[in-house]
Image: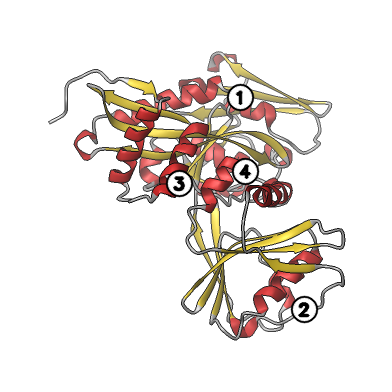
Amino acid sequence: MKENRMMTIKQLKTQAEWEQIHALSSYAFDVNHNEIQKENFFKLCSIAKNFGDVLNGTLTSSLMLIPFDVSLFGKFIKMGGIGNVASYPEHRGQGNIRHLFNKVFSEMKNDQILVSYLAPFSQPFYRKFGYERLFIEQELTVPSEVLKFVEVRDGYKVERIKEDNREARKERLALYNCTLGRKHGNNQRSLTWYECCQTRADNHHLAVVRDEQDQLVGYLDYKFDKEDVIISEMIYETTAALKMLLNFLTSHRSSFKNFIFGSLEDTSFLEYFDDTRVSKIYQTNGMMARIVSMSSFLEQLPIKKTIDGEVYLKVTEDVCAWNQGIIHWSFQDGVSKVTWVEAESQVATIPHYEASIGRWTQVLLGGMSLEKALNLGFVSCTHEDDFLGTVLLKGQPFLKDHF
């Protein structure tokens, strides 16, 4: 029986309220944090906007909105990461989460956050809020017999870090942000976020590569799991640094059966080895995403240099009313302009393309090509010309972190 009461959605800003969020998350996700993990949970609360549904002073549902900068074809834009979406079981199915998302979408629009990512427990559930599959995760398993030592340059050195500290973390963070953090779709890391991520890893080891000037040019984050070496991060700025890291791993091959690389953006380093037939790449669907404001997103979207032209895009949207309608997207002298069409009668022809906000997210961010979306029927088209296809940049987005 549903509870008959008004929803009370509020932003949770105090330590006492964060304690309630932690208790709810611990129950909903069946986790038992140690003191360090609990401290980092509160650090995460401090950099996030936290929203909850409160009944008689008790938190019933909550979610976190974590701000990030992400790369959009080389241009950084604001992204809102959604995490810790949870409700106590007696309050589920009452619309609490929908009301929380409505509030958060308005917050993101007001804060000029253009896109949002989340890790789904259920893809159909989050499609109701406009999210769609965007990221593909790759895990690479390399048997130890595949590895071999490769030729490296003099002057570079690799060493394990026995005692980590904040200055060392800042150094690794800077390297990450200027390398993998610039990949299309991926997020820049703040120091607080990076430290929270690091404490999630149990029994992990670190190794770094330095060049002739003692500058950090690469690092490994890894751990041992019985017969396997699990590499969670392999970051490098130069080819020489990559080779040093591979040789460091190869030096472990007599003690372990497999080397497992998680969340890889690029597997081309396998070309250094002679016979890789027994290596396996495992792909899964990763995080989902959605565009928060279609018009604002198109204004910021990098495009190819193109001839002058125009296209009408229709957006269907069940959650964010400001996205529902027809957009006129025009291009002149390499500059794009975005305007909303007030009524369909003002359009000389019917919209050139039509799709849901989720499918537009896939196409515009590169998770699915326009051609494939048309072939599968996710985008409908009334014109035979491929003007939109000549405008859009291509590239599969990559995301390393989860939240």
Indicate which disc, 2 or 1, sits on the residue closer to the N terminus: 2
**Residue 97 seen by the camera:** yes
Residue 230, x across and y down, in percent: 54, 68
Q: Nearer the viewer, residue 90 or 302?
A: 90
The residues bearing labels 2 and 4 have C-alpha atoms spaced at a distance of 31 Å
Indicate which disc, 1 or 3, sits on the residue closer to the N terminus: 3
Amino acid bearing label 2:
Val
Q: Nearer the viewer, residue 12 or 119?
A: 12
Taking the spot 32% from the left edge, 45% from the top edge, the residue there is 26
Q: Please give the residue where the numbered disc 1 appears in the rendered image.
A: 295
Taking the spot 62% from the left edge, 46% from the top edge, the residue there is 186
Task: Look at the numbered disc 2 and give the secondary structure of its residue.
Answer: loop
Q: Nearer the viewer, mark 1 or mark 4?
A: 4
Task: Look at the numbered disc 4 and give the secondary structure of its residue.
Answer: loop
Q: Please give the residue where the numbered disc 2 appears in the rendered image.
A: 150
Amino acid bearing label 4:
Arg
Task: Look at the numbered disc 1 and give the secondary structure of its residue.
Answer: helix
Note whether 303 is above or below 286 in the view shown. Answer: above
The residues bearing labels 3 and 4 have C-alpha atoms spaced at a distance of 17 Å
Indicate which disc, 3 or 2, sits on the residue closer to the N terminus: 3
Name the side, left or right, on which 161 lies relative to 135.
right
Residue 189 circle label: 4
The residues bearing labels 1 and 4 have C-alpha atoms spaced at a distance of 27 Å
Q: Nearer the viewer, mark 3 or mark 2?
A: 2
Residue 221, x across and y down, in percent: 60, 62
Q: Determine contact: label 1, label 4, CB under 8 Å.
A: no
Task: Look at the numbered disc 3 and give the secondary structure of its residue.
Answer: loop
Residue 119 circle label: 3
